Amino acid sequence: MRKLRIFTVIVFLLAVVGYGVYSFNERVIKDNDAPVISSEADIVEYSVNGDEAALMEGLTAYDRHDGDITDRIMVESISQLVNKNIAKITYVVFDSSNNVGRYTRSIRYTDYELPKFSLNGPLIFAKGADISIFDKLSAYDVVDGDISDSIRVTSQNVDNLIDGEYTITVQVTNSMGDTSAIPLTVTINSESVRKQLIELNEYLVYIEKDSSFNPWNYVKRVTTSNGSVKGITVAEMDSNVDTSEEGVYEVRYSYSNYTAILTVVVQ
């Protein structure tokens, strides 16, 4: 009986010691080490149409307990642009103990462009009519796609009760924080609304700096007031486009008191 009591005490003491060792390990030897993400380069080149695998190029992750955990790396966030075509991308990785490691490097978009506007018709309105440019004006971004809903008119002096030409400024901002803005001419003229004698292929175009530019390429047709089609060169043309300088320009085509305007953005 005495031997049984001694054995019971020994078992109890071993259990206490075992629990103490376990508790000590939990408190002292618990994995608190964050995994480390490493990169072969401080900047990654990336297409706006690229996939997530391209963002992971050159990255590895190592944890002292789990070993190689490169396949657990995720993109945590991408900043707005901090410089031309460059943003900051932050990666995150978790080990099996939920310790977290982070790494931030630069991302350069190889084919990024500013948002662009598109105009599908002349901005000509009848006297007294509502000026609804958003029926004709849209905006597209290579990152966000159609951002027409984000277009804002930031400057205007249009009096729709007086015939004439007026200048408005429109702008749009994409998710990268980049803003595009251009001035556009709005015409108030009831007669011109009824008789669109000059029709253009496009009413707003973007061309590269120092590229060739032929304004006649944008005239689709010229018609008389009775509907007869004329050669495009019967119209008079006045252009202030200078392809050697970036900026916003206009080409004016006139025929029989009707004027069509092509807005040209040199970039």
Image (spheres, rainbow, N blue to C red):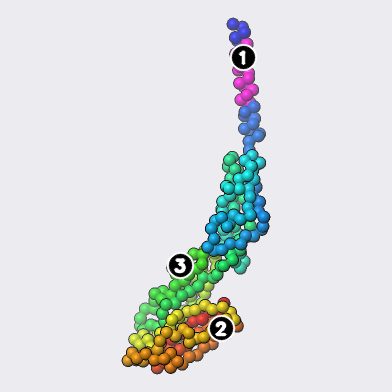
Determine the image quadrant of residue 33: top right
- Label 1, label 2: how far apart the Cα atoms are: 98 Å
Mark 3 falls on what kind of element?
strand
Q: In this view, does 45 lie to the left or right of 120?
A: right
Specify the label residue 146 is tagged with.
3
Identified by mark 2, the residue type is Ser
Specify the label residue 96 is tagged with.
none
Specify the label residue 9 is tagged with.
1
Which of labels 1 and 2 is toward the front? 2
Q: What stretch is highlighted in magenta?
A: 6-20
- Label 2, label 3: how far apart the Cα atoms are: 29 Å
Name the quarter where the C terminus is drawn.
bottom right
Mark 1 falls on what kind of element?
helix
Query: Pointer 2: what residue?
Result: 212
Identified by mark 1, the residue type is Val
Q: Which of 199 and 5 is in front in this view?
A: 199
Q: Position of residue 50 (x, y in %)?
A: 54, 60
Q: Does the magenta stretch include residue 14?
A: yes
Q: Where is residue 56 in the image (x, y as percent from the top left)?
A: 59, 54
The residue shown at (52%, 77%) is 206
Q: Is residue 159 magenta?
A: no
Mark 2 falls on what kind of element?
loop
The residue shown at (42%, 77%) is 120
Name the quarter where the N terminus is drawn.
top right
Determine the image quadrant of residue 176: bottom right
Q: How many marks?
A: 3
The residue shown at (60%, 83%) is 244
Decide which of tag 2 and tag 3 comes sooner along the chain. 3
Q: Position of residue 211 (x, y in %)?
A: 57, 81
The residue shown at (52%, 88%) is 239
- Label 3, label 1: how far apart the Cα atoms are: 78 Å
